[in-house]
Image (spheres, rainbow, N blue to C red):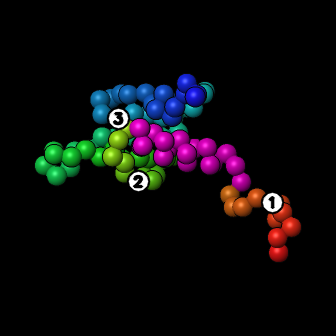
Amino acid sequence: MADWHPILSAVEGPTGTWRMLDEQGRMYGSVEIRRIMNGADVRYKTVYRGEVIGWATSLKVACERIHAAYVRSHGPNGGPVADWGKR
């Protein structure tokens, strides 16, 4: 099993806010903790490149969503170039 997880890219600061950093130290996303329903419940606001991409119920899920968006941004959008003979 791998020793790495997207949450390891998260650097906390200020309190309640995590910045997702790439290998060069550039921020590609952020997570903010929010208390809802009179402080009885917690949600994590997930932001990728300045755009809110959703809400999560844990820091782990929030980091995974941001990192998945980051990884997807490195490849082509759409399906594969090869059609594998299907028409």
Q: Residue furthest front?
A: 1
Sequence-first tag of 2 and 3? 3
What separation in Å lies between label 2 and label 3 (alpha carbons)? 15 Å
User: In this rendering, would 75 be left or right of 21?
Assistant: right
Q: Which residue is mark 2?
A: 54
Q: Which residue is mark 1?
A: 81
Dot 2: what SS? strand
The amino acid sitting under disc 3 is Thr
Query: Gap between marks 3 and 1, in whole Å?
Result: 39 Å
Residue range in magenta is 60-76
- Label 2 neighbour load within 10 Å: few <14, some 14-19, many 20+: few
Q: Give the image quarter of residue 33.
A: top left
Q: Is residue 71 magenta?
A: yes
Q: In the orientation shown, which residue stands out farthest toward the top?
A: 3
Q: Residues within 10 Å of mark 3 (few under 14, many from 20)?
A: some
For the point 76% across and 58% down, the residue is: 80
The image quarter in which residue 70 lies = top right
Mark 3 or 1, closer to the camera: 1
